[in-house]
Image (cartoon, rainbow, N blue to C red):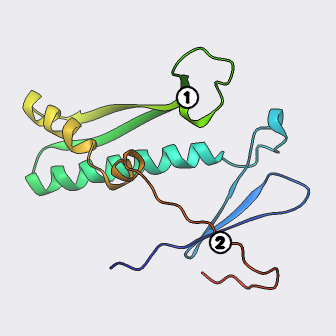
Amino acid sequence: MATPQTVLVRVGADALLADVQAGRHTFLLDEPVAVGGQDLGPTPYDMLLSALGACTAITLRLYATRKAWPLEAVQVRLRHQRVHIKDCAACEEADQTLDHVQKDLRLLGSLTDEQRQRLVEVSKKCPVQKMLGAAIHITTNLLPTDAKFAI
């Protein structure tokens, strides 16, 4: 079994700004000013879409390279929205809405129509998309206040 990936996120008492440490990399996530953030970084949803887009592009690059196809570049545009399944008084309940992600691909290079269609199918198999499309089991543990985190 692979070593689990570990990410540490810290948010202080006065802001929605999240300081993220992922291995040796650090970055900020925030919310827009309109919802109480400072807009000092992408939102958590932006990062989720970024992960899906990067995984898709990398998967296509690896596949095309292995097949020696003339894929010059990959561009992935993603949009997220919540779609209400039905009109109801309690539409914010978990079983009443559906998160929808639209993923648009732009494949640059002298590819045949068959190669392009195959790359569309391969794009649906990137590991992040497979994880998001599967039932994800999340456990939550409450640690003592004096617990120390290490990456």
Q: Is residue 14 above or below residue 91?
A: below
Q: Is residue 53 above or below residue 102?
A: below
For marks 2 and 1, the one nearer the N-term is: 1
Report which quarter residue 108 is drawn in. Answer: top left
Does residue 63 appear left or right of residue 35 in this picture? left
| Amino acid at pointer 1 | Thr
Q: What element does badge 1 sit on?
A: strand
Residue density around tag 1, few if under 14, some if 14–19, many if 20 or more, within 10 Å: some
Q: Which residue is mark 1?
A: 97
Q: Position of residue 111 (x, y in %)?
A: 13, 34
- Give 61 or 84, whichever is nearer the viewer: 84
Which residue is pictured at 67% across the width and 24% down the height?
90
Q: Position of residue 4 (x, y in %)?
A: 45, 75
Q: Is residue 81 visible to the viewer in this orientation of the structure? A: no
Q: What element does badge 2 sit on?
A: loop
- Give 14 or 116, whichever is nearer the viewer: 14
Q: Which residue is mark 2?
A: 141
